[in-house]
Amino acid sequence: MRTGTEPEIDAAVTAAENALRAAAGLRAAVIVVSSEVASGRDRDRGGPVAVELLRGLGIDTELDIVADDPDAIRTAIDRAAGGGVRVVFCCGGTGIGPHDHTSAVVADLIAFELPGVAEEIRRVGLSHTRQALISREVIGVLGRPDAPPVLLLAIPGSRGGIRDAIGVVGDLLGYIVDQLDGAGHA
């Protein structure tokens, strides 16, 4: 049963089609930040979810796994950005534990923040778990002097947190990259 009017439904379908068109040709990297996964003591459950969701949006996506170490995180981000990706999701290391470094590394690298995106990810996560209140998502833009800017996201590493984050920002990725490249407002 449809709850919206025909024009509302048509507008939603058009928006979804435009989002997919805008995302076509985008390249993204998913960097799983987990010392346990990187060492082989645990298996990666979140990375494949992120890759599947992004590929479902038509985004060519690569996967990397690094330990929760500031230098390893920075190196993986540099490698991804240097390889031509325009969106980097760092999944994991956004909690408040002594070994959660992703948020601080991303905050140090970005030229400016997109706080509304991080706030919405936390709000959506809160509808599932109160633990979302202590997650430290950081979303911003990695400005590079001789290369196009890169959208950089520090998001939770749990499957639910990844689904929430990509659910919030996924259909905006093409638009965000277009805006970073100087396109006019829709």
Image: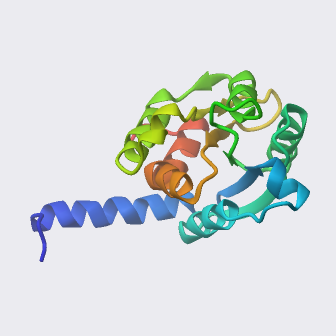
Residue at 83% of width from left, 31% of height from top?
Answer: 146
Furthest residue toward bottom: 1
What x and y, as percent, mark residue 112? 61, 23
Q: Quadrant of residue 99?
A: top right
Residue at 12% of width from left, 77% of height from top?
Answer: 1
In which quadrant is the C terminus drawn?
top left
Residue at 74% of width from left, 52% of height from top?
Answer: 32
Q: Quadrant of residue 116?
A: top left
Residue 60's place in the image compared with 87, above or below, is below
Left or right of residue 43, residue 119 in this image = left
Q: Nearer the viewer, residue 73 or 131?
A: 131
Q: Quadrant of residue 51?
A: bottom right
What x and y, as percent, mark residue 183? 52, 39
Q: Nearer the viewer, residue 6 or 154?
A: 154
Give the total of numbered labels: 0
Left or right of residue 31, residue 159 in this image = left
Residue 166's place in the image compared with 67, above or below, is below
Residue 138's place in the image compared with 34, above or below, is above
Residue at 49% of width from left, 28% of height from top?
Answer: 115
Left or right of residue 133, residue 52 in this image = right
What x and y, as percent, mark residue 80? 82, 48
Q: Nearer the viewer, residue 88 or 132?
A: 132
What x and y, as percent, mark residue 37? 81, 57
